[in-house]
Amino acid sequence: MQQRKIRMLTVVGGLLAGMMLLGASAAQADITGPMLANTCAGCHGTNGISGGPAMPTIAGMPAKYLKSIMADFASGKRPSTIMGRLAKGYSEAEIALIADEFAKQKWQNAKSAPQSKMATAVDAKLAKEGEKATKSAKCDKCHEDNGVFQDDDTPRVAGQWLDYLRFKVQDLKNPELKVPQADKMKAGIDKLSAEQLEAVAHFYASQK
């Protein structure tokens, strides 16, 4: 009798475990790109269109570029405050779904956002100086068409939030942060002063 009970409990336990595994598999199968991308909306805005000046818009950026950036955050290769911890919570497949979803979205210029009034205003004079600086540092070799161009290795910077661009160029200039960047980009950044980099941020933010 006792052995029968043990066998029954073993069978029931096995069935329950199997059901749990099937349920987990079904839940995993139901995960979609839009669902995962929606978890990013708190910072990057709905569909990747940022609603805050310190956070970049990622809508419409190349999927391969986004995957690479998230992988760098997850591995710790790219320094961060929050993104590294968040990226570690996703599998490679989930990161791919997120990147593909944002890549499908349409880019929106930061100046078109309702929150643009709370952002630092672009200085037209600085923007002109920034244009000269981009040519001096040969930024247009990769960031073609005044920063509109993008590919698997190059993000769009034209029309991005000014405050974000300012923070980003400062990070690139800071040797302690060791932000991953191509040799030619590092050479260009090193060539420019802090004042010139500020002007570069104003220039790219002024573009459509």
Image (tube, rainbow, N blue to C red):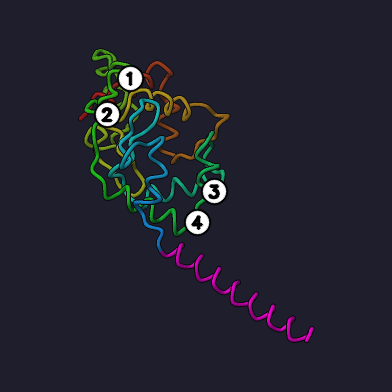
**Residue 53 image offset from top left, x and y in percent:** 36, 25
Q: Quadrant of residue 122?
A: top left
Chief SS of the magenta region: helix
Could you tell me which residue is drawn at 23 percent across and 15 percent down?
Answer: 124
Residue 48 vs residue 16: left or right?
A: left
Label pair 2/4, CB-CB below 8 angstroms: no
Tell me the CA gap for discs 3 and 1: 30 Å
Residue beneath label 2, please?
A: 110
- Inspect the magenta stretch and tell me whether residue 128 lies in it: no
- Say what amino acid the circle numbered 3 marks: Lys
Could you tell me which residue is drawn at 55 percent across and 42 percent down?
Answer: 85
**Residue 16 image offset from top left, x and y in percent:** 59, 72
Looking at the image, tell me whether mark 1 or mark 2 is earlier in sequence order.
Answer: 2
Residue beneath label 4, please?
A: 91
In the image, farthest residue toward the front: 1
**Residue 90 image offset from top left, x and y in percent:** 50, 52
Residue range corresponding to the magenta coloring: 1-29
- Say what amino acid the circle numbered 1 marks: Ala
Q: In which quarter of the image is residue 8?
A: bottom right
Residue beneath label 3, please?
A: 88
Residue beneath label 1, please?
A: 119
Q: How crowded is mark 3: few (under 14 residues within 10 Å), some or many (20 or more)?
A: some
141 or 124, nearer to the observer: 124
- Inspect the magenta stretch and tell me whether residue 21 lies in it: yes
Secondary structure under tag 1 reads loop
Tell me the CA gap for discs 3 and 2: 28 Å
**Residue 126 image offset from top left, x and y in percent:** 29, 15
Looking at the image, tell me whether mark 1 or mark 4 is earlier in sequence order.
Answer: 4
Label pair 3/4, CB-CB below 8 angstroms: no
Label pair 1/2, CB-CB below 8 angstroms: yes
